[in-house]
Image: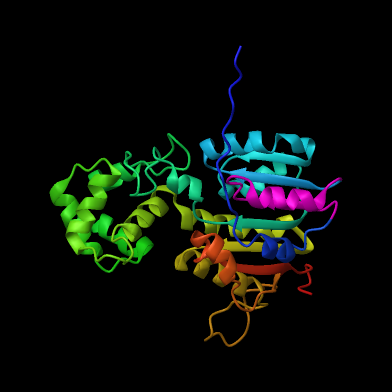
Amino acid sequence: MTSTVVSIPNHIPVLVKEVIEGLQVHVDGSYIDCTLGLGGHTEAILKHILPGGKLLGIDADTETFNITRKKLSNYGNAVTLINDNFNNLEDICLKNNFYPVDGILFDLGVSSWQLDSAKRGFSFQNEALLDMRFTPGKGPTAAEIINEYSEQEIAHIIKHYGEERHSRQIASLIIKNRPLNTTSELARLIRDAIGYRQGRINPATKTFMALRIAVNQELENLKIALEQVVSLLRVKGRLVVISYHSLEDRIVKQFMKRESRDCICPPEAIECRCGHIASLKIISKKVIKPSSSEIGNNPRSRSGKMRIAERLSQEGK
């Protein structure tokens, strides 16, 4: 009987050294990787926390999760893997008695393997149905959005999530040419709408990113998850977030800034009435970016931005 060999996709995690240092990973520590992916950061952390450390890994992408579960099977009870959205972070930790922890990591966006996967529809580089869902069967597909939403709704998604200045033009052309069901159909339509100059970024890039973010409610889920991290971190525990999109980074920056202040009342307030106590200390005053050598080895890391914060005591110290 011939055994089936599971092919593990090649994966280069971003800012690995900086993640380990930022989280202050140590032997016997406990950590949460909210974006398990193909396990690059997860495995790097595991190698630093054994023999007594524990790690909880979470990922909403079912296909990626099943691959990584096999990849990390040799780590046994040191790792607990959950196929779920990180917007359920607190419930996941409570159910698995995994708190408080020494560090929590978010590596946002999609992996190179997801982008390169021919059947998922994340990229215009491969012919596929316009799906883009991290969790198959859950929520509308990208095709349903562009074929059923109004012109105004489509234009808003493309402009808000993709920061595409030609959003109205693209949305108008989508309405006139739908139904559109494949990546190549949509990419070709966008190219016809706004043109393409050799050597420039593909004109479909921002629209595809916007649709993926909308399909998976990525920004909304990030906001929900960040609100849960403080209660799960032990004092001096670290939060590390890597983002690849200006909107993601803005959400992270604003959250860390808000939680590092004792008062979050409006500037016009004469006296503080909010009763808010700072729960985090910002460690990275400036965003941390990949080095030129890392970008040379992994060009897709070039847009990565990392921020670090540390849990304060309940007294804000």
Q: Is residue 2 left or right of residue 77?
A: left
Whether residue 201 sits left or right of residue 294 in the image: it is left
Q: Residue at x 51, y 66 (%)?
A: 302
Q: Is residue 242 above or below residue 265?
A: above
Residue 129 shows in the view? yes
Residue 272 to residue 202: above or below:
below
Task: Decide: is 282 above or below 14.
Answer: below
Residue 93 shown left or right of residue 116 in the figure: right
> Can residue 149 be seen from the camera position used here?
no
Query: Within the magenta stretch, is there residue 47?
Result: yes
User: How far from the left and from the top, in percent, is residue 243?
Assistant: 53, 63
Q: Is residue 17 magenta?
A: no
* Between 134 and 68, the one nearer to me in the picture: 68
- Taking depth in this image into account, of 40 and 157 the one nearest to the observer is 40
Q: Which residues are magenta?
A: 27-51
Could you tell me residue 213's position as x and y percent? 42, 54
* Residue at the extreme top: 1
Q: Residue at position x 77%, y 35% from top? A: 76
Q: Position of residue 17 (x, y in %)?
A: 69, 62
Location of the C terminus by quadrant is: bottom right
> Along the horizontal axis of the image, is 96 left or right of 154?
right
In this view, the residue in front, 135 or 297, is 297
Decide which of 277, 17 is in the foreground and name it: 17
